Image (tube, helix red, strand yellow):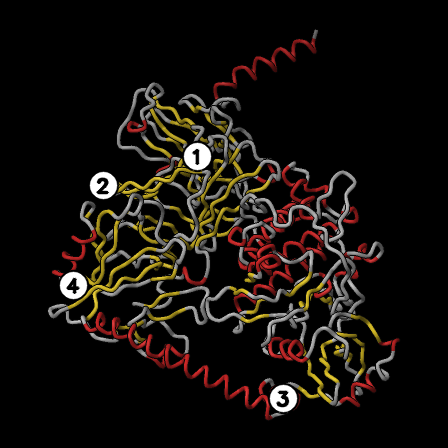
Amino acid sequence: MGTIFFLLIFLLSFYYCIPKIISTTTNVITTNQSIADGETVVSSGGTFELGFFSPNDSTKRYIGIWYKQILPHMQTVVWVANREKPLTNTSSVVLKVNKWGILALLNGKNEMIWSTNTSRSVQNPVAVLLDSGNLVVKDANDDNPENFLWQSFHFPTDTHLPEMKLGKNFRTGHEVYLSAWKNDNDPAAGEFTRHIDPTGYPQALIKSGTSVVARIGPWNGLRWSGSPIPLLECCFFQFIFNEEEVYYSFSLINSLDLTRLVLTSNGYIQHLKWVDWTKRWHIYYNLPADYCDTHSLCGAYGSCDIDDTPVCGCLEKFVARYPQQWEKGDWSEGCVRRTPLNCKKEHVFIKYSGIKLPNTKYSQYNKTMTLKGCRQVCSRNCSCTAYSSLDISNGDKGCLFWFGELIDIRKLSERGQDIYIKMDSSERESEAGSKRNKAMILTLMSFSLLMAMILLSLIFLLHKRKKKKKLLLKEDFALQMFQLSTLTRATNNFSLNNKIGEGGFGAVYKGLLEEGQEIAVKRLSRTSMQGLDEYTNEVIYIAKLQHRNLVRLLGCCIQGDEKMLIYEYMPNRSLDSYIFDQTKKKLLDWPKRFHIINGIARGLLYLHQDSRLRIIHRDLKASNVLLDIEMNPKISDFGMAKSVIGNEMGAKTHNVVGTYGYMSPEYAVDGMFSVKSDVFSFGVLLLEIVSCKRNRGFVHQDHNLNLLGHAWKLYKEDKSLELVDEQLADSCNIFQVLRSIQVGLLCVQQHPDDRPSMFSVVQMLANESLLPKAKEPGFFIERDVFGEEKSGSQTGSSKNDVTITLLDPR
C-alpha cells in the first residue's frame, strides 16, 4: 500500500506541474506556460523546433530554432534569440510570454536576459512557431500576419529562409538584413552583413562593417545582375520595390524541400539544400563566386574578367588613369576615357555587352520608358554618364541611369547585360575608321604572311632541319642539352635492365646521373610513328609549363640520329600500372584515388586556363599520368598537345590524334577538338580510377555496353555504388565516390556544351554543391575497334588503348 501511495503522490505532483512547463508536442507558448532547458516546442508540420542549444564545441546555451528532422549531430540552427547574451547556467531560466505580449527569457530572479518588443497589446497573446520557421507573437485568435506583435523573420541572424523578406520598410524605417555568426562556435554578430540597399536603385550587397566587400548587383527582372548562376529549379524568387517597401524573398516549388541561404562567418552567401539520401547539406552556389566579385577591384571604368590575366582591364576606348600603377597590379584608380568627354558638345553612346551592371548607388530609374527614351533623357542631362534597361524579364523595359563614374564592372559573357556609356563623338568615327583600318591591316597581314611563308620555305630548304631544331631548343627554351655520352653512361648503355616503358615514341629508360640524380630518358625510336615534329612539340609546350601536377622536363638531347627527352624520374611509374593490375590496385585506397583525381583535374585546369599557352592535351589517359614517390599525379606526354590563342577554345583538324577509349565523339568522328575534348578524356579516366576497369575492352555478363554505358545504366537505376572497385569497401567515402562518379558522367556527356569546364570540375570535386543531372554519355554503346596500343610513358604498354599518331604539320 505504501508503494502505491507514493506513486499516486508522484503522479499528482507531475500533473500539477504541467501548466508551468510546455508539452513537447505543441507549437504554442501561452501566458501560463514556459519552456526550460531540455524542453522544446515544435512547429505544427514538424519542420522546425525551438529550444535551448549549444553550438558545436561550446558550453554556452542559447535559445534558437533548428530543423526538427535533421539528426542531432547535424543540428542546423536557423535563428538565435540571445546571440549577444549567452547563458552559462540555465538553472531556473525559462522562456515565456507575459500578458503584454512580450516574449522574454528570464532568470530565477525574474530578470530579463532577452526579450521581444511591441508597441501595442492584445487580449490573449501567445508565441507560435510556424512551419516556415518563423516565431511569432500574436493574439491567439488572429492569424493575420499584418497584426502580429513581433516575428523572428523581422530579426533574422545569419539565415534567409523561404518566405522571409529581406529589405526595408520605408514607412517604418525597419530594415531586415542578415548578420553572420562570429564563427561556428559563437552566434554573436560577426563581421559580415547582407543587405538589400535601396540607395539609388536597390542592389544586393555584402558588407564588412560599413565597407562594401561584394555587390551582387541590381535586380534586372530575372535575377541580380551580377549573379553568375541561372535561376534555380527549386525556388521561385521575388523582388518587390514600391513606395512602401523594398524586399527580396524566395519560396519553394516543392514545400517538402529544406532549402536556405546562409551568410557565413567569412562573408559568403551560400544557397544550400538538404539531400536526405546523403544526409548532408549540398551547396547550390557560393557568392562571391570568385576574385572578380571583389567590390570595385578594377576601379572606375575597369572591367574584371576571371578568365583573363591579369583579371583587370579597362573597358574598350578607356585607358588606365595611372599606367605605371596599373602595370604594377594596382588597379584601384581605374580608367578614364581615352578621349575626354564634354557632354555639352556632340557626344555618342557606345554599347558594351555581357557585363555585370555597375554600382547603382548614384543612379536613377524610370519603370516605363523605352531604351530610345532612355537615350534622349541621358543625352540631355550632362551629369548622366550611362543608361541601361531596368527590366529584361520580357524584352527591354524601363531605364536605369548612372551619374558619375561607373564602378564595379565585371565580364559575364553568358548572363551579362548591355550598358550604353556616353562618349565623345570622335569615338564613333574612330570605331568606323577602326573597322576600315582593321580590314586594311588584315589584307597587309595576309600578304605579309604569304611572303613570310615563302621565305621560310626557302630557309627551310637552305638549312639543315636538325641543326635548326637543336638551336631552337637550346636558345628559346634555355633547356639543358645533355650529351649522348652522359645519357649512355646514366642508362648503362640503354640496357634492357634499365628499360621501364615502351610507347609510340619509343623506349623509356631509368638513368642515374653522376651527381646521383635519377632521371627518365625518353628515346625516340628510328622506327617510331612519331618524329621530330612531335619531339619538338613536346619540348616547346612542356618547357614553358610549370605546375605540381605536370611532369617536369629536365632537358633534351639531339645528337646524330638520336633524339631524347630527359624527365624527372617517377618511382611509382604510371597510373595504369596500378588501377588495371589486380595486385597493385590494392595499394590505392579511396583517399589516394581521390587525391589523384583532384590532382589530374588541377593539372588540366592549369593547362586550359591558367598557363600562358592554354594547352589542349589531346591524349589524356591512364598511361600518361605518372605518380611520384608520394603518389602525386603528373600529367605527361605532350607530343600531341595543341596550343590555343586568347579565348579560343579549340579547332578542327583533318588528322585526328589520341587514344581510342578516351577520345570524345566530336573529335573522333569530325576532327573537332577543344578543351571539352580533354574534359571527356578526364571523365573516362575518372570512371576508370573508381572502377579499376578499362573503358575500351570492358565486358559485362548482362549487356554489351562499354564502361561509360555501364556507369550510365547504373546511374539511371540509382545503383552507382555497384561500379566501385571492390577493394575500396573499407576506405570508401560514399559521398565522395558517388559525387566523383556523377562528375565523371557529366564530363563524358555526348554534347561538348553540356560538359563542364575543368574549373567547374575542380569546384564540384572540392565542395558539396548540388550537381546537375548527367545526360547520356558519348560512345554509349561499345564500338567494334581492333588493335592494341603501345603507350608512350614510363611504364609498360597499356592494353586496349590504340593511339592514333597522324599529326598536323606544325
Disc 1: which residue: 252
**In the rendered view of the protein, which quadrant contains the C terminus?**
bottom right
Which of the two discs, 1 and 3, labels the residue nearer the N terminus?
A: 1
Disc 4: which residue: 383
Q: Nearer the viewer, mark 3 or mark 2?
A: 3
Which of the two discs, 4 and 2, labels the residue nearer the N terminus?
A: 2
Q: Residues within 10 Å of mark 2 (few under 14, many from 20)?
A: few
Disc 2: which residue: 242
Label 2: state its secondary structure.
loop
Disc 3: which residue: 474
Label 3: state its secondary structure.
helix
Label 4: state its secondary structure.
loop
Q: Amino acid at mark 4?
A: Ser
Q: Amino acid at mark 3?
A: Lys
- Where is residue 222, by image quadrant? top left
Asked if the residues shown at circle 3 and circle 2 are in contact, with their CB atoms under 8 angstroms apart, the answer is no
Q: Amino acid at mark 1?
A: Leu
| Relative to 788, residue 544 above or below | below
Q: CA distance from mark 1 to mark 4?
A: 43 Å
Q: CA distance from mark 4 to mark 2?
A: 25 Å
| Relative to 261, residue 604 above or below | below
Q: Residue at x 28, y 40 (%)?
A: 240
Q: Is residue 59 at least partly visible in the picture? A: no
Which of the two discs, 3 and 2, labels the residue nearer the N terminus?
A: 2
Q: Residues within 10 Å of mark 1 (few under 14, many from 20)?
A: some
Asked if the residues shown at circle 1 and circle 4 are in contact, with their CB atoms under 8 angstroms apart, the answer is no
Identify which residue, 303 or 179, lies in the foreground.
303
Q: CA distance from mark 1 to mark 3?
A: 64 Å
**In the rendered view of the protein, which quadrant contains the N terminus?**
top right
